[in-house]
Amino acid sequence: MLALVGLQQYAWATDVYTIDMNSSKSRFNNSHVMNLLKAALEASSSRYGAYELKVSSLHMERERLLQEMLKGDSVNLSGQVTSAEWESRLIPIRIPLDKGLSCYRISLIDGRKQNLFSAVQTLDQLKQYSVGTGRQWSSSSIYRHAGLPLVESNSTLGLHNMLAAGRFQYFPRAIDEAFYEQAAHVQEFPALAVERSFALYIPAPRYFFIGGQQQRLAQRLEYGLQRLIADGRYEQLFHQFYDGLIEQAGLRKRRIFRLDNPELSPLTPLQVKAYWYVPD
């Protein structure tokens, strides 16, 4: 009888997901991450039952976030650019959140220097300029491996201030970040612009990660995402959110400099074409 009661409690338990504030992208009017997440959890409800989705009130840089994710109390879900450490210490759901679009980085620059970048035709030529990056970001090791000169900071805001001060020449961002941040910071730095001629391709997709070794939460979310892929909503949500940004960025017309990622996991599902966006 006790075993039956236990099974009933398990079956009707509410799965609680607490996503970190940065991943929720709450500063955007329409967050693809949150729309995808909610759709996946809804799609899993017929099998897994009720769920609750919370946004953590804590603002954390990546290293602190990892420690909190390992505990799984204040936050147990994050959408992050993958790294060997995160994949080994947390539970990765290896389905790119944005079809790998965040692997393509366009840059914020001092718009008065656009002619310098327009003249760059090769990766070796790009190496004459410094790139701004976060000390805890997984992309930093990729830039370093490629031989790009780095200037690092502990925060995104610090990097914006350093770009305005001329401490480095370009600040690569995912395309949604680039346009949002240009609009957010142009008032204090009127010359801030989105660079128009090139993009970096960094093979480091953005995944959902589950912390606290909560296997059920990971299995449920992966199941929901696979249902969205099967019925076409994964593709539909991607195009609804990103098609305008891809056009605005002129991604198909840019020179793309591809960087290697020596730490990319062999488990990365590069062979699953449905998971990846390719500019045509």
Image (cartoon, helix red, strand yellow):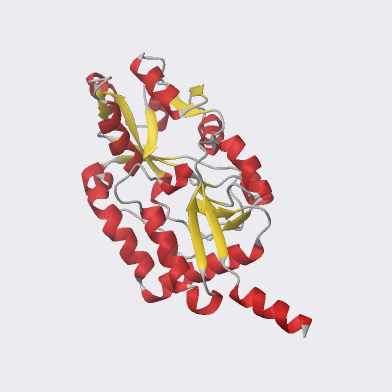
Number of numbered discs? 0
Compared to 242, does 127 lie above or below? above
Depth order, front residue of 85/278: 85
Compared to 159, does 272 lie above or below? below
Please give the name of the residue rendered at 40% of the width and 21% of the height, measured from the top-left corner.
129
Depth order, front residue of 171/27: 27
Depth order, front residue of 156/29: 29
Compared to 196, does 189 lie above or below? above
Could one spot residue 98 in this view of the protein? Answer: no
Could one spot residue 135 in this view of the protein? Answer: yes
Q: Position of residue 88 (x, y in %)?
A: 68, 50
Please give the name of the residue rendered at 40% of the width and 66% of the height, measured from the top-left corner.
39
Hey, which quadrant is residue 185 in on the image?
Answer: top left
**Which quadrant of the figure contains the C terminus?**
bottom left
* Residue 46 falls left or right of residue 279: right
**Which quadrant of the figure contains the N terminus?**
bottom right
Q: Position of residue 158 (x, y in %)?
A: 44, 22
* Residue 199 falls left or right of residue 250: right
Compared to 41, does 101 lie above or below? above
Q: Position of residue 102 (x, y in %)?
A: 41, 47
Please give the name of the residue rendered at 26% of the width and 34% of the height, measured from the top-left corner.
197
Looking at the image, which residue sits at the far bottom? Answer: 1
